[in-house]
Image (spheres, rainbow, N blue to C red):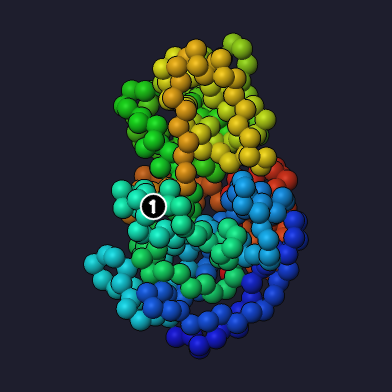
Amino acid sequence: MTSPATPHQAAVLTGPGTFQLTTRDHPAPGPGEVQIQIRSVGVCGSDIHMYQDGRIGDTVIQAPLVLGHEFMGVVVEAGAGLQDGDDRPLQVGDRVAVEPHVACGHCRECREGHPNLCLHHTFMGVYPRDGALQQYLNVPAHNCFVLPPEITDAGGAMLEPLGVALHAVRLGHVRVGDRAAVVGAGPIGLLIVALLRLAGVTALHVTEPLAWRRDLAVELGATSAEAGYTPDHDTRYDVVFEAGWADRSVQDAALLARPGARVVLVGIPGDDRLTVQHALARRKGLSLVFSRRMSHTYPETIRLVAGGMVDVDRLVSDVYPLAEVQQAFERHAGYQPGVIKVMVQL
């Protein structure tokens, strides 16, 4: 059990490209909350946007912020009225993955089963709510999911990006026997590749400019992988997932799609612009589907990883301590050779 105010270390983003390690007092958890001792935090592409630009989409960071939304930890203290929405209350010592999106639970979107579209949400690690690059964090108990021993600490943090990938694949309405393509083989794109193989696609093409990521895409199940789209490409894919949002990625996804195909847009652009030729998308009659985070995915991702169906640990390429968070972000932001998923361990 922790004291009412726990001094601990936090990595605070004080401006674009600048972290400061500070010591702060963390309050005891409130009703319905648990205090988590953070163990593993993944660095996400959206974290890099905020680190480099001080914003993500139209959300501007207006004060120092603790990043980190892909994370797991250990329950060290419980607030009053604790329930986890499962078959038992959370207990001190439980290893848990934490869903970072905190929906209001009362709006129309929440009531209709789409908490990821809640207009009144907060999101850990996105302004104004602090995230997990700190030693302790209070979170709603119902956002916690107990991890079985088969899932490593790093694997627990990877459930968040796996959930994003799973939500995107569901939006694609993939059918057994479909031909699929993925544009961008970062961590989300690679996890989409792994899930598409499980879904029974008969062809799985990946475009990705970084050679080591193309190699991993093939290892995870891609049937072909190239650096980018060229005019002689096959353009008859039933469903295409855009998971890069850099340069021509949305346009390339539309080019790869057959007429009548579904194109699922998963990537987040740094400049908040979508670039696709209207005539191309219209003449092909494409359905452009925008994927927003995830919805009700943690139980399924736990089963996929614990059952050995998706090897999320294979994507972890680099591990840094909290004291080297600046180097961790620079490693990811620079796309240095071999980097796939950078993990910060506390």
User: What's under tag 1, amino acid-wise?
Assistant: Pro
- Residue at 40% across / 60% down in the picture? 104
**Residue 198 falls in image quadrant:** top left
Q: Determine whether, in the image, residue 111 is placed left or right of residue 133.
A: left
Question: In x, y percent, where is residue 165?
Answer: 45, 42
State the quadrant of the C terminus.
Answer: bottom right
Q: Observer-nearest residue: 80 or 234? A: 80
State the quadrant of the N terminus.
Answer: bottom left
**Residue 80 falls in image quadrant:** bottom left
Q: Determine whether, in the image, residue 25 is placed left or right of residue 74.
A: right
User: Which residue was labeled with disc 1?
Assistant: 115
In this rendering, is residue 170 above or below 135? above
Question: In x, y percent, where is residue 278?
Answer: 57, 19
In this rendering, is residue 25 above or below 331? below
Number of labels in the image equals 1
- Residue at 31% across / 72% down in the picture? 83
Evaluate whether residue 193 shows in this view: yes
- Residue at 59% across / 63% down in the picture? 128
Q: What element does badge 1 sit on?
A: helix
- Residue at 41% across / 74% down in the picture? 33
Question: In x, y percent, where is residue 228?
Answer: 63, 24
